[in-house]
Amino acid sequence: MSFRPLHDRVLVRRIEESATTAGGIIIPDTAKEKPQEGEVVAVGKGAIGDDNAIIPLDVKAGDRVLFGKWSGTEVKIDGEELLIMKESDILGIVEQTKTARKAA
């Protein structure tokens, strides 16, 4: 199934954090918080301005983003749990620097 959000909405896949701490302690699912980082899966065409012009979105599919703890609406598409949120719920885009890419 194909899904495209409308207007200024964005479809996001949560990026799961590691299940162990730096010290090797395994964190059970019941104690973990839901991650606030995700990957943009699909975006709408843009917001509609006062003059009915389409204002393009700053995020695009494939961007890694941070969003608020209570942002978005959880939906299940093709058996996968995703979030639909407005672009304004996204706090920022995570960009890797050149030095971070070399170290990875």
Image (cartoon, helix red, strand yellow):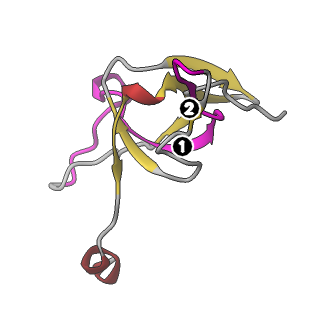
Query: Residue furthest toward the bottom?
Result: 102
- Say if the magenta span includes residue 47: yes
- Neighbor class of circle 1 (other Cα within 10 Å; few <14, some 14-19, many 20+) is many
Q: Amino acid at mark 2?
A: Val
**Residue shown at 72% from the left, 32% from the top:** 4
Q: Image point 46% across, 30% down: which residue?
A: 87
Q: Nearer the viewer, residue 23 or 69?
A: 69
Residue 39 lies, with reference to residue 12, above or below; the image says: below
Above-or-below relation of 38 to 9:
below
Mark 1 falls on what kind of element?
strand
In this rendering, position of residue 23 left or right of residue 54? left
What's the CA distance linking mark 2 and mark 1?
7 Å
Type of residue at label 1?
A: Val
- On residue 10, which mark appears? 2
- Residue 1, disc: none
Is residue 18 shown to the viewer in this render?
no
Residue positioned 84% across, 33% down in the render: 1
Quadrant containing the C terminus in the rendered view:
bottom left
Rendering coords of residue 100 (x, y %): 27, 74
Q: Which SS class for mark 2?
A: strand
Residue stretch rendered in magenta on the structure? 24-51
The answer to the question of whether label 2 and label 1 lie on touching residues, with beta carbons closer than 8 A, is yes
Residue holding disc 1: 40
